[in-house]
Image: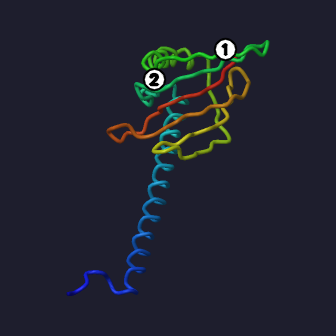
Amino acid sequence: MKSHLPLPGMRTPVLATFMALFVCTAALTTETSLDDARQCFDRYVALQAAFDPAVADLYSDDAKIQNTRVMPSGEKRVMTLPAPAYKGIIRQVMPVAKERGDTSKYSEVKYAKEGDKVRVTATRYSELKKYSSPLSLLVGPNKDGAWLIHEELSESRP
């Protein structure tokens, strides 16, 4: 009876080839997702800088939106909004923000994988109010493969 098993020295090269392909594919997927996350964040920044209400379209309809308002007294008030309401507010305030020159600059931008999504953290500087605050966005593909914001955790001051 003939054995269907590879010869003793054959198993290792096949396994090694498989493992190399797996590692390369995982690295490619990670790099691709980080590139997609960078492109998503760059679009977010560009649309905000242009005061384009289309920035609202970057948010998933089920995104978690949470803002911590830091009062002059140091008191913190946490507010959460349903994504559809937040998207509506963005569309309404863009013309007002443009009129006021309410722009932001982003620094210390970092990207970290979280499952099939990427956490983007940055420091946002408000040119109008002259303060810096942390921003965290969780971005990733939706069911159609489009990269959207699935969570925004931000901080603001009055």
Is 105 drawn above or below residue 81 in the view shown?
A: below
Residue 149 in the image: x percent, y percent?
Answer: 47, 33
Residue lying farthest to the left in this orientation: 1
Horizontal side, residue 62 vs residue 130: left or right: left
Which numbered tag is attached to residue 121?
none
Residue drawn at the location 55% of the way across and 17% of the way down: 80
Can you tell which of label 2 and label 1 is closer to the viewer?
1
Q: Secondary structure at mark 1?
A: strand
Report the amino acid beneath label 2.
Answer: Pro
Decide: is 118 above or below 69: below
Camera-side residue: 30 or 59?
30
Q: Position of residue 17 (x, y in %)?
A: 41, 74
Answer with mark 2 or mark 1, whichever residue precedes in sequence. 2
Q: What's under tag 1, amino acid-wise?
A: Arg
Say whether residue 95 is left or right of residue 70.
left
User: Observer-nearest residue: 10 or 154?
Assistant: 10
- Which residue, given by chain and number where applicable, does mark 2 sit on? 53
Expressed as whole percent of the image width and height from the top left, the position of residue 60 reads: 42, 29
Residue tagged by mark 1?
Answer: 77
Q: Secondary structure at mark 2?
A: helix
At horizontal 44% and vertical 69% (from top left) the residue drawn is 19
Residue at point 67%, 34% (across, down): 123
